[in-house]
Amino acid sequence: MKRSLCFILLALVWANVSDAQENSFYSLGYDKVNLRAGPAERFPIKWVYQERNYPVEVIDSFEHWRQIREVDGTVGWVHQKALKEARYVVILEEDKLLASPTVSGKVIAYVQPGVIARVHSCPTGDYCLLQFVDGVKKVEGWFPRRFIWGLYEGEVIE
């Protein structure tokens, strides 16, 4: 009896560990997502996100819930269904969006802090290729990696 109980507990722990998606960036998949104080609907809502594609970092998991951290350090829990794998980032400081990944590249636009962009690629080097959407207009260009939140240091996205 003790041995089978031990195997059942070990299997439950393994299921939680193997299902974990910690230390990964995701984005919010809905226009409205509740951030909760704990990993269940019975926990109070701390904040309501109202922006689809907002990037978050998953730092822990429990069953179908993911503990997330956002750009300002806020931490809480969301249901896994509220997350999608599409990579978006937040701009941290104003800088130029360039036509090529070099300092001397043609300036396409100036991007303000807090703007959200989709990551097309982020090769090794100092720049990432991002897409910004303003209504129906899409603008794409290279932006300095050092002013982006939503990537790990040295992370390559192709």
Image (cartoon, helix red, strand yellow):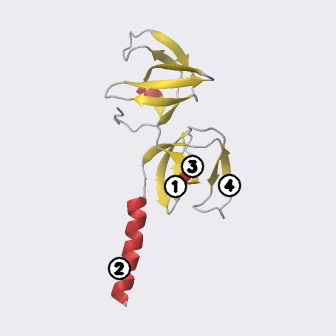
Give residue 56's mark.
none
Regarding mark 3 in the picture, which secondary structure is present there?
A: helix
Relative to residue 8, is residue 53 depicted above or below? above
Amino acid type at mark 3: Ala
The crowding category of the residue bearing disc 2, from other C-alpha atoms within 10 Å (few below 14, some 14 to 19, many at least 20), is: few
Relative image position of residue 77 (x, y in whole percent) = 57, 55
What distance separates the C-alpha of mark 3 from that of mark 1? 9 Å
Residue at image coords 63%, 23%: 135
Among the 4 quarters of the image, the one containing residue 32? top right
The crowding category of the residue bearing disc 4, from other C-alpha atoms within 10 Å (few below 14, some 14 to 19, many at least 20), is: some
Residue at image coords 36%, 34%: 157
The crowding category of the residue bearing disc 3, from other C-alpha atoms within 10 Å (few below 14, some 14 to 19, many at least 20), is: some
Amino acid type at mark 1: Arg
Q: Which residue is mark 4?
A: 45
The crowding category of the residue bearing disc 1, from other C-alpha atoms within 10 Å (few below 14, some 14 to 19, many at least 20), is: many
Q: Which residue is mark 3?
A: 82
Q: Which residue is mark 2?
A: 7
What distance separates the C-alpha of mark 2 from that of mark 3? 32 Å
Relative image position of residue 2 (x, y in whole percent) = 36, 88
> In the rendered view, does 60 fall on the left or right side of 37?
left
Residue occupying the far left of the picture: 124
Front tag of 3 and 1: 3
